[in-house]
Image (cartoon, grey):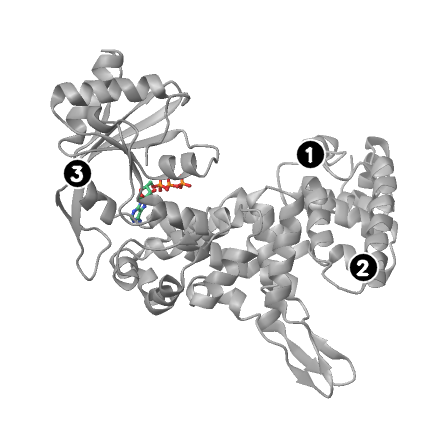
Amino acid sequence: MVINLSQNRNLKLFKLISEVAQKNGQSVFIVGGYVRDLIMKRKVPTDIDFVTEGNGIELAKSVAQEISPSLKVSVFKTYGTAMFKHNGLDLEFVGARKESYAEDSRKPAVEGGTIEDDQKRRDFTINALAISLNHENFGALIDPFGGIEDIKAKIIKTPLEPSQTFSDDPLRMMRAIRFATTLGFEIENSSRDAIKKEAERMKIVSKERVMVEFNKIMLSEKPSVGLKLMEQAGLLDLLIPELTALKGIEEIEGQSHKDNFWHTLEVVDNISVNTDKLWLRWAALLHDIGKAPTKKFVPAVGWTFHGHEFLGSKMVKTLFTRLKLPLGNDMKYVQKLVKLSSRPISLIDDGTSDAALRRLLFDAGPDLEDLFTLCKADITTKNSSKQEKFKKNFEYVAEKIKEVEEKDQIRNFQPPITGEEIMELFNLKPGREIGILKEKVKEAILEGVISNNKQEAHDFVLKEAAMLGLKP
Ligand code: ATP
């Protein structure tokens, strides 16, 4: 089979690489994701991988020289690779490799090899396709493992024996699930069994690498596909046991609760329809993790999960630390949303007093819309009249919040009187009293005792300060 590259927007570049390789007496092939996506008629990646049976670094240097002598080539000697940027593309060159693996590492021993050797070491048949750029067969597709058939059949399959492939480099298990999720493919049965068998080997892979794949699953159209595959293989239990702990339904005295694991997957899919924000999707994934450790059956009341949002938000930090996820603002954002995830609903149950609405506005701040997106995704009841009722309730709370917001400007709350102003007013040095007075002002505004303006805050501070024995 020959791939027609005549209309390809990179044809000129491919011809140039072909010429340079010919001059150097080297072979050259396009490999990997670019070939896969080109054949699948997907948007092709901007990074293109080239393999040569020979020295990849040499080839990269001579191609770069031909394009422009001033092009900067980055060389990674240990891996025998070199890359440079050209026309918005990342072009990477590597010498064909033959690999063998040791038991305790995903870093193989490497020696030079043929294009076929190089294709053998690739993870899946659909990623093991190569297009020749050589003079004698420019555009010829080299498909020793039936990658084209597997693209047609939508199958993820390893070129070699699956257990060995996954044991050699366990990251491939996550990649299999990621490709199945993002491409909408099935993992072939023996590969699926092998992932189950080799799941424990995932421990030798760095968390950072695993999370790159996990986040690609989280950003896919329907993340539950990948999460289910991970669950079936035992990988989710290894990685995020807080989630698998939510599995199951218990029944006592004829009362049962929902299966919070399957509920969570639904919430993640729901939210993915409305947002591409990775960390908002993570908040959906983790919003109920506090439910397993707080679950209790209280006779005459039923199943309770008291304080699960608070505990859940604490668990977020432990989990992010373990998974080597960023511990800055992204984590704080997830913590905040998990902590507030039940607030809008409880507002409906407890009555929507202005004070409660102001507190929610204050606590959610700029993330209020995201909190509402989460709460809407959390409605998974199949009972359509209940669904309608819940949605109406939210609209009601949203409307009420808008009214309060217009009146009080709490969302991006800035104290109407600053610490410096308080110090100046009473001729104070920095100290405890300033904090106490500022907190009292904030509380008075949230409770509706005073309005959110300078004059009322000023008068209020004078009164409160007098009680602390302070005089202006
Ligand atoms: P995407 O761009 O969607 O991540 P990709 O296939 O281009 O997909 P890369 O990680 O850039 O993914 O890898 C490029 C190619 O290198 C793959 O197509 C595959 O042939 C090979 N490859 C990558 N990682 C592995 C691995 N862990 N084991 C074997 N081959 C791999």
Q: Is the shortest distance between ligand 1 and the CB of mark 2 under 8 Å?
A: no
Q: In this orientation, does residue 181 appear? A: yes
Q: Please give the residue where the numbered disc 2 appears in the rendered image.
A: 387
Q: What kind of residue is marked 3?
A: Thr
Pick the quarter of the image with the C terminus: top right
Q: 382 above or below 9? A: below
Where residue 405 appears, x then y in whole percent? 82, 39
Instruction: Mark 1 and mark 3 in contact? Answer it, CB < 8 Å.
Output: no
Q: Amino acid at mark 2?
A: Gln
Please name the residue shown 39% across and 51% down the image: 175
| Above or below, 250 relative to 180 | below
What whole-number distance in Å separates the C-alpha atoms at marks 2 and 1? 53 Å
Using the image, determine if residue 106 lies above or below residue 255.
Answer: above
Judged left or right of residue 157, residue 99 is left
Residue under label 3? 78
Q: Element at badge 1? A: helix
Label 2, residues with CA under 10 Å away: few <14, some 14-19, many ≥20: some
Residue 80's spot in the image, x, y percent? 17, 35
* Quadrant (top left, top right, bottom left, bottom right) of the N terminus: top left
Packing grade of label 1 (10 A; few <14, some 14-19, many >=20) is: some
Residue visible at 18% across and 30% down in the picture: 56
How many residues crowd mark 3 within 10 Å: few (<14), some (14–19), many (20+)?
Answer: few
Q: Amino acid at mark 1?
A: Met
**Which dot, 1 or 3, sits closer to the camera?**
3
- Please give the name of the residue rendered at 42% of the width and 49% of the height, measured from the top-left corner: 213
Q: Is residue 212 visible?
A: no
According to the picture, the residue beneath numbered tag 1 turns out to be: 423
Q: Earlier in the sequence, mark 1 or mark 3?
A: 3
Q: Which callout, 3 or 2, points at the residue further toward the start of the chain?
A: 3
> What's the residue at 72%, 53% (across, down)?
375
Mark 1 within 8 Å of ligand 1, using the beta carbon: no
Q: How many marks?
A: 3
